[in-house]
Each structure stands twice: as structure tokens, then as C-alpha cells.
Amino acid sequence: MKHHGEIQRASLLSASLQDLPDQPEALIRARAFAQPLLMGATLDTGEDSLAHADAVTVILHQIGGSEAMQAACYLVYAADHLQKPEEVIAKAFGSSYADLALETARLIRVQRQARAVAAESQVAAMQTENVRKMLLAFSRDLRVVLLRLASRLQTLRHYAASKQPVPHSLAYESLHVFAPLANRLGIWQIKWEMEDLAFRFLEPQTYRDIAKLLDEKRVERENYMVQLREALALDLQGQGIVAHVAGRPKHIYSIVKKMRGKSLDFSRVFDVRALRVVVPSVPDCYATLSLVHTKFAPIDSEFDDYIAKPKPNGYQSLHTVVRDAQGRAIEIQIRTQDMHDHAEHGVAAHWAYKEAGTKGYAGVSASGDYDAKIAVLRQLLAWERELSADAQTQATTDALSDRIYVLTPDAAVVELPQGGTPIDFAYTLHTNLGHRCRGARVDGAMVPLNTQLKNGQTVEVTAIKEGGPSRDWLNPDLGFLASSRARAKVRAWFNAQAMQETAAKGRDAVEKLLQREGKTAIKLEDLASQLGFKSAEALFEVVGKDEFSLRNIETLLNPPATVMGADDYVRLKKSRSHEKASKSGVLVVGIDSLLTQLSKCCKPAPPDDIRGFVTRGKGVSIHRADCGNFRQMATRSADRVIDVDWGQSSSAQALVYPVDVNIEALDRQGLLRDISEVFAKEKMNVIGVQTQSVKDLAWMTFTVEVGDSRRLQKVLGLVKEVRGVRTARRR
């Protein structure tokens, strides 16, 4: 009878997220299908294509891949030699095989292009990140990832056997991307070998030095380990524990990592002498551990219980380091057969014996236990977060499903949201390119601008020399934009255009006024400065919005020539009582029963900083201290300015003051209603509304009653959150 672990290893296919249907003699048929297509063909690494495919199927078989998975391997490489691969493969083997072959072939092509660009730029970090993105983007179908891992391992074996020089980018990518991915999936059989081979190519001298140290006294060490293994197996048998005791392979790269990470010399690396004990059950694991710690002297700091607390990739085992009577360190791993199967084959053992389910990830039908698949996908997500922890990326918990990765014609990788279009692509490259985008080619074929892109496609945009976006791009029903960032850039462009039109309108009005007054010689910047504006453009903007009256400019250009007489001033009387507030709520300092009125130009309200200006016949006009009209009047007639302050209302009901609020927004149906609702919810009475719309841009002036202007700032903040509102400020 087959052991449970062997049953598990028999089907790696169940680790995929999409079943390959079993077909009679699928492997034989697939090889026969691919052989004439691959005859004489070579890969970019120099490998014979058919020989490479043969070797990859062997690796898949060794890690538990089903015959169907092995058959798919041949179809992947055959796809590059077919004019219509999807149709031909689907007709011969079914759509599932065709989808897998094309998806894997696309990933190979994309990674090859990305690696070529990185090799030219000599930026290893960029290369690693790009390839990682590619793998993650295609990992929704785990079969693709498994095929790529097996293929990369065979490529490294080819370079090792042929003794050809290995491209640095390929070796670096294998060590820093593929091997960590195999580790995350728990396929240590591939991980260890890939690490050692890649390290051998990257640091040949260090590799040779460690290999030489391992070979020294190798015979003596192996004889000692044989005696130790037999003695331990006999002791366990005496305790009634059926165990398989074996030596553990020594992986050079793991030794180097320990030496560098812990600053150890070779003599202090404990796992040079190592045993692995496989027992039937978890209680047997701990019973074996007890016997080992009784027989040898344990090193307390070198004990790890990965059964009670498994590693992130699901790995379980007991690790301990002990010393024999001569003080030699020995690492011993203790695990059950199921734990061993998972350690060797990862996801294959995790799902192999699960019944087929109907759920899946990202809408793809699944085989095996759904929760188990999600667990492995979480490992991929964790791996992504670890590698990009120092980078400011937009990674989310749904990173595998909401991002796609496409290529520029120069093979640079561009990250887009799921459903991204050529316009999203253009805006990601450069804002100005997005504005001017008018056409696109995807994999060489012209496509509409609202085409949803897919992983691995090469995108080229056509742009005009000058121009801007279309308003249709902002229509969500038309599907031109999926990126919120791109939409914001389009809106910003239209807002800037509206602002330019407003400023042009204001400039025209000011220049016409200067013509009428015969003051065309005056410099516009000087005029703006005299009116209290930072620049002429700022003046044009407020004039264009009708927020600044042209009468103010007329008054500046033609100041009144009248000289005030004695009767033009209001006679001030000394107060014979305490300072009292007028009906307006304004207290004139030192003056009793003086007529005051709130100016209509700036509409002050408590606790604004205010000033008084003595008028002819209308008492004291109350202005905000920052009022432009007040500054002009104070400059001409400084002796009319008096100090005022807010008093306390003597009535039972608190006083309210009218205040103007200017709002600028993108015009839409229901805009006025939505803004009014904000004021209503905040219990702020609206007593007047003026609106004006020009080319989809609306300017509104709300007159509201407030008791305290400070509360108005909070309400304006809520108004700014209304959809379409650009600015909301007090006039």
C-alpha cells in the first residue's frame, strides 16, 4: 500500500487554481504535438527547446506534478511556433490547456524583455522588482508559477552542465526572486538547488571555498554520521518508535548565509553535521526530541519548535542542535511524514488529497480545498509585502487581483489598476503624454482607447503635438479611465482651462475699463499692487469671477476731489455711562449712542477684526480690517478711522450677521441642492443665492446668517467635500 505522503505527491495539479482535465495519454500526445515544432529550435539561453521541455517535465514529475501538468509544459514552448496558438491548442487539447500555455508563454516573454532592459541599465534592484511584479501578476493561476520555477531550475542546470558563462541578471533574478518564491510556496526541493546554483554563478570563488571546506575530512565525517544515524535509529526502536533516520543534505548557500548573518566562521556552523528523523505522529516527534536531549547535550539557544508555531509558508518541524561527547555540534530535524512531504513539495502536498471544490480565487474555479489555496495566496502577498517594505508602493491586501503589469515598447514595466486602459498607461508615463494621447497599439495592433489591458501586453500610444483630454474620458460609463490618479489629472486640466478662461474674462474687463478712463499707460502689475493684490493675474481672476467690482478700480483711478466741511463730520459725544453695544452689536470705543452700520462690501461678523470709518450722514461704517475698500478709504482719509469692537447683545436673542460665501465648482445637476443641504444640516440660514455658469464651471455666492464667523470655517470645510466643489471661501 502506498504511503499517505506518496498519495499526496502524486498530484501537484491540485495545487493549481484551475483544473487541467485528464486526457488519455495527454503527455505522449503533447510531446508528439510539440516535437516537430521544436525540432532544431533554441531558447534565448542557448538550450535546445525540446530538450529543455523534456527536462522540465522530469522536474515536475519529481516534485509531484501530474501527467496533465507535464503535458502542458510542451504546449507552453510549442505556442511560440504557432500562428494562432490559442485556437490550435484549444482544438487539440481544450481551452484550459490553451489558456495555461499562452499565459505562461506571455510571462516568459515579459520577463525576458524586463531582464534585458535591467541588464542594459545595470540596475539589479529594478530588475528584481520588475520580475517580482510579473510573477505576482500571473500568480492567480498557480500552475504558471510552478512551470516557471521548474523551467528556471532547468536553465540553471543547463548552464552548470555546459559550463557556459551565465548572465549576471539571470543568476541574480534566480537567487533573489525565484528561490524566495519557491520558499514561500514551501517547495524546498527546488529552493535549495536553485540557491546553490545561482550562488555558484554569482560568487564562484566563495562557492569553491565553502565546497572545499565541506570536502575536507568528508570521509571521516560521513563515517561518523553513519554510526550516529544507526545508533539513534536503534535507540528509537528500543523506545517503540518507528523512525526513518537519514542525513540531511548540506546546502552551500545556507551555510554562507549563516556565516554572514551571524558573523560565524565555518567551524561554528552547526548544520554541517545534520540528521533528519521522520516519525509517524506528532507525539512521536516530541518523544524523539526527549530521547535526543537525554542522549546528547542540547544547545538551548538553538532549539526551534516549528510544529507549535509553523513558519509563514506552512513548514513544520522540530529543530535542535546538540553536542556529542567530543563536543561536536549536530543539528537534528524531527518531523512527521506529512510534514516532510510538505517541506519537500510545498503546495503539492498541501492540497493533493483534497476533494475538488467549486470556489476559487479571483473568479477562477478551484480544485481542492478553498481555504488552503487562500492560505498559499496569502503567503505570496506576505512575500510581496516583505520585498517592498521599504518602497512606497500602493500595495494592498488585494494586490494580486487589482493590479496588472504591462510593457512599454522599450520593455519597461508599468503598473496599472485592474481594468486599466491605454489612456491610464499614458498618464502613468507622463501627464502631458496622457493629455495628448489619441491612439494606441497593443502588441502591435490598433485598439480603441477604452480597451482594458491585460498582464504582459506591450502598449504603445500615439500622441498629437498639442492638445488636451476629452470630457468623455471622465464619463465612467464609457470606460476610458480606471485609475483615480489619471482621472484627477484630467479634472485638473479642465479646471486649469476654466481658470484661464476666467482670468482672460477679467483681463478683458480691466483693459476695457482702462481704455474708457484713458489710463492705458498704467502698468497692470502696479494697478494690482495698489488694489492690494499680489499679481495682475490674481486681480483678473477675482474680476472674472465678479468677486471684485470695477468701481473699486474707477475710484482708485479717479479719487473724489471734494473737501470735507465742518458739518460733514459726525459730532462725537463723550460717554456718560458704560460702553454699550449698538443694535448692530458693535461698540464704538468711548462713544455712546452712535449710529453704526455693517458694510456690505465685506460683511463683518464676530469675532472678525474690525475698523470703523466715519461717513457723511450715515454714522460709522463697520469694515473688516482686511477689507480692500476700507484700506483705500483709510489711505485717503486716515482721520475718519476710529476704533471699534464687538459688544454684547442686550436682547435675549443672540444677534446674527449676514456673510457672503463664494463657491467655485464643476457644474452638474443637483449641485445647488447638495450645497444647500450642507448649510441646512448645519442649521445655518441661507438668505440669498446668486449663481453663474460658464462652460461647465459654476460660481455661486451664498449669503448666510452667522453668529460667529469661526463656525463658518467648519461649514466651509464640509462644503468643499461636496462632489465637484473646487473652492469654498468667505468673500
Image: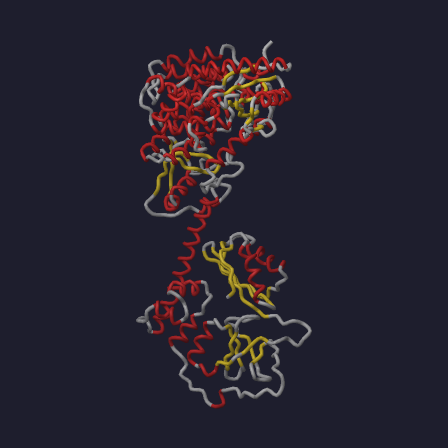
Residue 99 visible in the displayed image? no
Residue at the spot x=41%, y=39% of the render?
425
* Residue 272 or residue 699, whichever sits in front: 272
Q: Is residue 711 placed above or below 20 in the rendered structure?
A: below
How far from the left and from the top, in percent, is residue 264? 44, 31
Residue 675 visible in the displayed image? yes
How far from the left and from the top, in percent, is residue 318? 57, 25
* Residue 479 or residue 528, whichever sits in front: 528
Residue at the spot x=40%, y=72% of the render?
553
Name the colouring of the figure.
Answer: secondary structure
**Is 259 situated left or right of 318 in this image?**
left
> From this viewpoint, which residue is outermost toward the front?
326
Q: How many marks?
A: 0
Residue at the spot x=56%, y=28% of the render?
303
Q: Is residue 564 placed above or below 325 in the rendered structure?
A: below
How far from the left and from the top, in percent, is residue 99? 47, 23
> From this viewpoint, which residue is outermost toward the bottom?
566
How far from the left and from the top, in percent, is residue 550? 42, 70
Q: Quadrant of residue 647?
A: bottom right
Q: Quadrant of the N terminus?
A: top right
> From this viewpoint, which residue is outermost toward the top?
1
